[in-house]
Image: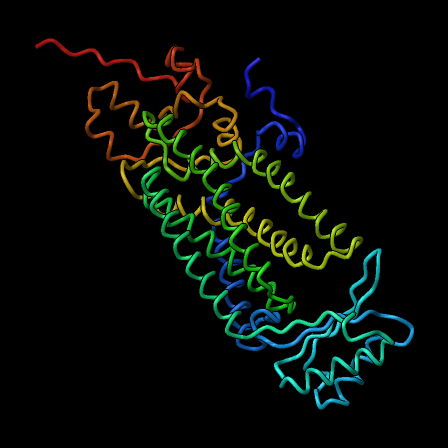
Amino acid sequence: MSRADQIATSGPGRLYRGQTAIDFYGHRKIGLVIAIATFVITVGSLFAQGLNLGLDFEGGQAWDVPAGENFDVDAAEQVLSDNGVDPSSAQIQVRESESRSVIAIQIEVVDEATAQSITDGFAAASSAQSDDLNFEFTSSSWGADITRSAIRALVIFLIIVAIFISIRFEWRMAVAALTAMANDVLFAVGVYTVFQFEVTPATVIAFLTILGYSLYDTIVVFDRVQENEGKYAGVRMPYPDVVNISMNQVLMRSINTSISSLLPVASLLLIGSGVLGAVALREFALALLVGMMTGIYSSIFIASPLLASLRANVGRTSRRDRLVGEDLRAAVVGAGVSGRVLTNESTADAAVDGQGDDADDKAPTSRIVEPDAVHQPAERILSHPPRPRKKKKRS
């Protein structure tokens, strides 16, 4: 029984066995539309409300005050109002853990006397000593230093990635990979600005981490593309077909890798932050979760289709139609490895009559055949029996 006869009957079964036949290149416009929509939403939200920068970037004072029956969010707002600080401009949230519950208050920079008065007010309202309160002061210049360092690290990272991919593969793959990573950052920024999640140094670190994850998934796909490009070099297969075959072959691997990576991050976010109350883990895990999910999408629907578009008309040309449907599935599972056999009637006739040079002017059609089909008689390969050779008349 051939491998083509062992195709699973259900969609999940074909996905599990690596027998999918998804035309990623044919659906490339969907990825382009989503990328454009993400860009528009992100830019619009940035102009409308901006990023919710944390204390480390904005600068200001922060207090962690023990929560109790006498001290809650309303009491904290009252203390700020009594000291001339608008509560609406402050960030106040309750943080709970197994050991204790605290109310975190963050405000913009105020003078030292006002800060000391607020500290005393929190201590009196919560029936605690001033020394028991956790007080932090951060200058906005420190946040600016973090931003510059992050941008510098990002630029260096992108340059190294571009050089590596160009040497290991080719420059078009570097363009596709960098475009996918840019989409990852843009999407993550869009999520943070639309939902107003707080941006902290942990968020920046997570952004740099997800770029490496996105690059890894893209490199896995590109490596298979390069392998298949050499494999089909003798059959003049269109480059979009090579990309489609490669994507379907590594699709299950990409899904498995993504799931195994997302589960620990989801555990950090749900258990570490939600159950145990580790707020620092929440900031890091949230950025990782958003970035990883975006990286999965970009490596499949942006990087590879873009690479196929850049290479579609480069190098050797082919007039054959792209593989779709069962023809594509046959190539994915290996039933069409030996090539695509021409079935154009004029080409076959020209080959018989010795007019092969003129046959190239006519566009042939093609179909995938079994690996041993090339060794079978012509009647088994061609879609019609060849014309008998005409006998030459003797003069």
The residue that appears at 56% across and 70% down in the rendered structure is 57
Quadrant of res 167: top left
In the displayed structure, 87 sits above or below 203; it is below
- Quarter of the figure with the C terminus: top left
With 362 as the anchor, is 65 left or right in this view? right
Using residue 393 as the reference point, say whether residue 66 is left or right of it: right
Residue at horizontal 39 percent and vertical 37 percent from the top: 321
Q: Is residue 49 above or below residue 338?
A: below
Location of residue 348 with respect to 118 vertically, above or below: above
Name the quadrant containing residue 84: bottom right
- In this rendered view, identify the residue nearer to me: 203 or 340: 203
Position in image of residue 337 (x %, y %): 43, 22
- For the residue pair 269 and 243, the one nearer the viewer reads as 269
Residue 209 position, x and y percent, is 53, 50
Color style of the picture: rainbow
Residue 154 location, quadrant: bottom left
Residue drawn at x 80%, y 53% is: 275
Residue occupying image coordinates x 55% and y 21%:
4
For the question of whether residue 27 can be seen, the reply is: no
Front one among 73 and 313:
73
Near-viewer residue (276 or 340): 276
Q: Is residue 63 visible?
A: yes
In the displayed structure image, the side of residue 95 where residue 305 appears, left or right? left
Q: Is residue 219 above or below residue 386?
A: below
* Residue at far top of view: 394
Residue 227 horizontal/vertical position (percent): 40, 29
**Which quadrant, please, contains the N terminus?**
top right
